Image: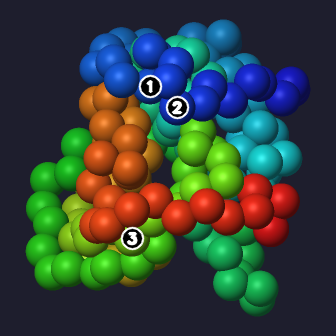
Amino acid sequence: MAIREIRVDGDPCLRKECKPVTELTDRLKETIDDMFETMYDASGVGLAAPQIGILKQFFVADCNVEEDDEPMPMVFINPEIVFAEGEQTGTEGCLSLPGYQGVVTRAEHIRVRFFDINMEEQEMEAHGFWARCIQHETDHLHGILYKDKVEGELEEVDPEE
């Protein structure tokens, strides 16, 4: 496994529409392993393929962030949000915009259809922070950054915190 370079705001990769994944290759599995290592090393909860320069529709996430939560690493390949309802407003940050955060409103409850690491179709319901994380990472696959949805201004924060 290897730590990959995370692309930052201004990199054209972050603004492109990604292509669907058509097959699970050994190279893709290795990339996914690298993405988990990169995400955890950067203290992130999600990392999408375009954030490491790959224009394919997949991301990794582990949105269990409470101290007593067990880690729950998940792979989402070709994700499609098929249902969304309710609203939640909260602060978001992004590994591709280090040093900034902003307030974004997203759906409170979603259902997402995707392929897992074995290319088996799955459907998952998510609420709260998991729903926010999945929506944020899915946006990356369509060239959308959270700053496009920020209510008000981005706020500078210490990226080491």
For the N terminus, which image quadrant?
top right
For the C terminus, which image quadrant?
bottom right
Residue at position x 72%, y 45% from top?
39
User: Where residue 9 is drawn, which disc sits there?
Assistant: 2
Query: Label 3 belongs to which residue?
Result: 103
Display colour scheme: rainbow
Residue at position x 80%, y 40% from top?
37
Residue at position x 31%, y 37% from top?
144
Give the alpha-carbon distance from disc 2 to disc 3, as whole Å: 18 Å
Give the alpha-carbon distance from disc 1 to disc 2, as whole Å: 7 Å
Query: Label 1 belongs to which residue?
Result: 14
Helix, strand or loop at mark 3: strand
Residue 86's place in the image compared with 3, above or below, is below
Q: Residues within 10 Å of mark 1 (few under 14, many from 20)?
A: many
Pick whichever of labels 1 and 3 is earlier in the sequence.
1
User: Where residue 148 is drawn, which disc sits there?
Assistant: none
Percent of width and height locating residue 64: 62, 73
In this rendering, the label closer to the viewer, 1 or 2: 2
Percent of width and height locating residue 36: 72, 41
Percent of width and height locating residue 18: 34, 19
Q: Residue farthest to the bottom?
A: 68
Q: Residues within 10 Å of mark 3 (few under 14, many from 20)?
A: some
Q: Is residue 50 left or right of residue 47?
A: left
